[in-house]
Image (cartoon, helix red, strand yellow):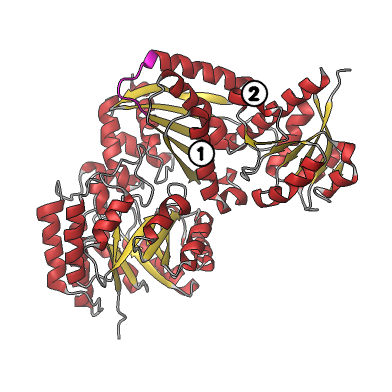
Amino acid sequence: MKPTISIIDSTLRDGSHALRHQLSADAITAYCKRAETARVPILMVGHGNGLGASSLQLGKALLSDREMMIAARAGLRSTKLGAFLLPGYGTIQDDVEPVLDLGVQVLMVASHCTEANITRQHIEYAVGKGVVTYGVLMMIHRVSSEELLVQARMMQSYGASAIILMDSAGALLPHEVAVRVRALTQGLTIDVGFHAHNNLGMAIANSVAAVEAGAKIIDGTTRGLGAGAGNCQLEVIVAVLQKMGYRTDLDFYPLMDAGDFVTANIMTKPQEIGSIELMSGLAGVFSGFAPHVRKAAAQFNVDPRDIFMELGKRNVVAGQEDMIIDVAAELAKRSA
Amino acid sequence: MNMKTVKVGIIGTGNIGTDLLMKILRSDVLTCGMFSGQNPESVGIRKAQSLGVPTSFESIHAFEADPDCAEIVFDATSAEVHRRHAPILEKMGKFVIDMTPSRIGKMCVPSLNLDECLREPNISMITCGGQAMTPLAYAIMKVHPDTPYIEIVGSIASRSAGVGTRNNIDEYTQATRDAIVHFSGVPRAKAIIVLNPAEPPILMHNTMYAEIPHPDMQAITREVASVVERMRTYAPGYNLQLEPTYENGRVMIMNTVVGRGDFLPPYAGNLDIINCAAIAAAEAYARKKVL
């Protein structure tokens, strides 16, 4: 019998990128009620880059972390409320501790795929508090499956109960996902999850490849709402997995209703693979850079696609949004 | 050279300690009287021995056994270890320069508060981000004292972030933020640190954002230029990457720090700047003593 796949809904976290982090409290509560009805097991909420990430560098959120968590809590009963943390942005004292007091039950602690040992403090802290704690490795296209396993093992040793691999740039093809997921399912004692981006139109195919390689957790968003070209569309992957014989235990009609709600009430523009998102996938640059690249391209009068290719060459990582200005200024100087 | 020098000691023979040693050997007012650690495998110890510097594996006990080996002591161990060392060194009457983020002593940024630090028994060099960015925050607040918010983002090469920084990334972030508030007086500040594993390694790259609705860009540019000039007197690799720019209610300043390549490679400007600052403090103390 095929295993049950556990679903994480990141619509109100990664989807926040698509709204430039301007989610309202009403929209959060209303969406949470729908996720609850759809029996979503874990719903992530917050600024796209996580706790403490509301900033001039990454974009100021309309609401504080605290306000977002309170709004979410109001709409949830049995669905677990999750928060995301990138060490270096948020800290335990300033950002994690306060939201645990507001009822956050799941914490994802994330790092770039080669920097897992900056998550030790936070994973150990959250595990000690009895919070379900997942380690997240981002931008996984940048490293081999062997290196990924070394990093994932560190997070496992800190106490993480699962590792989520994120194809943050939407740069991988299905066979590349499969080899990475398989290395982890074979080399770890804890569950493995996968979080896709759709820059190359591979989000569903890659999520399927991950499940076939042994991933037990799929992280996506309804309508694919998310950074850049968006994420793995949850309604679709749930339908596909069902068709393949996997169980998800979600209530399918209410899940589609949640997607309809996103289109009608949350989305400000269609979630599409535009030329910029496509270039971001090709260059292997974090999807969330797109709005910043557009702005810098206009400010310095350079082609946004050139900015992406140059950012790719410099191997920028999530959080280095300031490099966009640097690159745009340099490209402008070069063509002057 | 017959100029009088002051003896200094270093506890901790890792990257920071060894780079400090190389800088001390170049100084005309400092001599290294003790280079002490506890790791017999340390590359730094072997390097020190080959240069004829007195060494020990007894860590702080080397100073207890021979109190006259140094007047100034750099502690380049860890915050936890420095908490044990601090009272011992204070009792011995040493001038202590703390390279760890223990936050025991007075925070010191040489271009901002060097003189008052020389009267303290123990000074804290905060963090590399703090050394690189507090002077710029101070300059902004000098021109626009009602600025409500300053944010700094530091990107450093993964290879230049040691286990200490990684295990204590929260303390690093918070200490940097607190230093910005303390020195500049801005009511709210945020510090972000990003590790970049790119090969070849990236230079330390910092960005500062300040919320200023109607900035006097000429005055800001002038102040920033003078900060760069002052910083370069002791950290020669301190460069402005992008002249101050204004966009949509915020002023943005970018800099990079190229290391001197003494023991650590030039990309590790983050480690270089905190060491340069520590040496500047030690030399100022020594000059006061000698004169």
Report x, y in % for residue A196.
30, 59
Front residue of A284/A113: it is: A113
Would you call the spot at circle 1 few (<14 residues within 10 Å), some (14-19), or many (20 or more)?
some
Front residue of B90/A232: it is: B90
Front residue of A194/A212: it is: A194
The reply, left or right, for residue A195 in relation to residue B45 is left
Residue A209 has which mark?
none
Was residue A314 drawn as part of the magenta stretch in this picture? no
Was residue B216 drawn as part of the magenta stretch in this picture? yes
Classify mark 1: helix, strand or loop.
helix
Q: Chain of mark 2?
A: B
Classify mark 2: helix, strand or loop.
helix
At 86% from the left and 46% from the top, the residue drawn is B64
Q: Work out whether mark 1 precedes mark 2 in sequence or the reverse, and give the earlier one.
A: 1
Report x, y in % for residue A231.
26, 57
Residue B234 has which mark?
2
